[in-house]
Amino acid sequence: MKKLVVSAFVEKGEIHMILDGNPVASLFPVELELSDDEHVLQWYVDSPIGGQFTLSISSPKSAEMQLTKRLGKGEKDWGGVGI
């Protein structure tokens, strides 16, 4: 088993997390036990007003990352990572 630990902050707007095609709770930090199989974590950020977001994956070690980005008014960002 491996543990997924994700933290996120959105200054203005919303962030949606999806793990293997299923929505993840939007209260951060999120901590989930995962099987040792391959998984995909995706995110989608909508900023109708404009603002900054930070996404941090601190576990498992193979997926560690931190992303900070400022979005303009009405911009969106999306991405994903294999876990």
Image (cartoon, grey):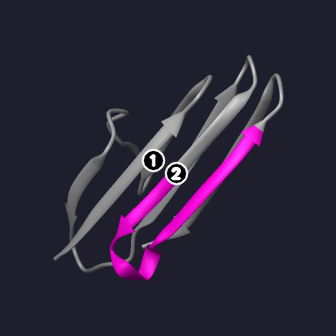
Image coordinates of residue 48 in percent, x first then y, are: 73, 19
Tell me what residue is drawn at x 45 percent, y 73 percent. 64
Up-down: is 38 above or below 66?
below
Residue type, numbered disc 2: Leu
Q: Mark 2 points at which residue?
A: 55
Residue type, numbered disc 1: Ile
Tell me what residue is drawn at x 66 percent, y 29 percent. 46
Task: Please tell me whether the stretch drawn in magenta is mainly helix, strand or loop.
Answer: strand
Q: Which of 57 and 42 is in front in this view?
A: 57
Based on the picture, tell me whether residue 12 belongs to the magenta stretch: no
Q: Residues within 10 Å of mark 1 (few under 14, many from 20)?
A: some
Image coordinates of residue 80 in percent, x first then y, are: 58, 60
Tell me what residue is drawn at x 47 percent, y 57 percent. 56
Q: Nearer the viewer, residue 16 or 5?
A: 5
Q: In what element is the residue under mark 2?
A: strand
Q: Mark 1 points at which residue?
A: 18
Task: Please report the bounds of the magenta region as a residue range.
Answer: 55-70
Q: In what element is the residue under mark 1?
A: strand
Mark 1 or 2 closer to N-term?
1
Based on the picture, tell me whether residue 64 belongs to the magenta stretch: yes
Q: Residues within 10 Å of mark 2 (few under 14, many from 20)?
A: some
Up-down: is 59 above or below 77?
below
Up-down: is 5 above or below 76?
below
Q: Quadrant of the N terminus?
A: bottom left
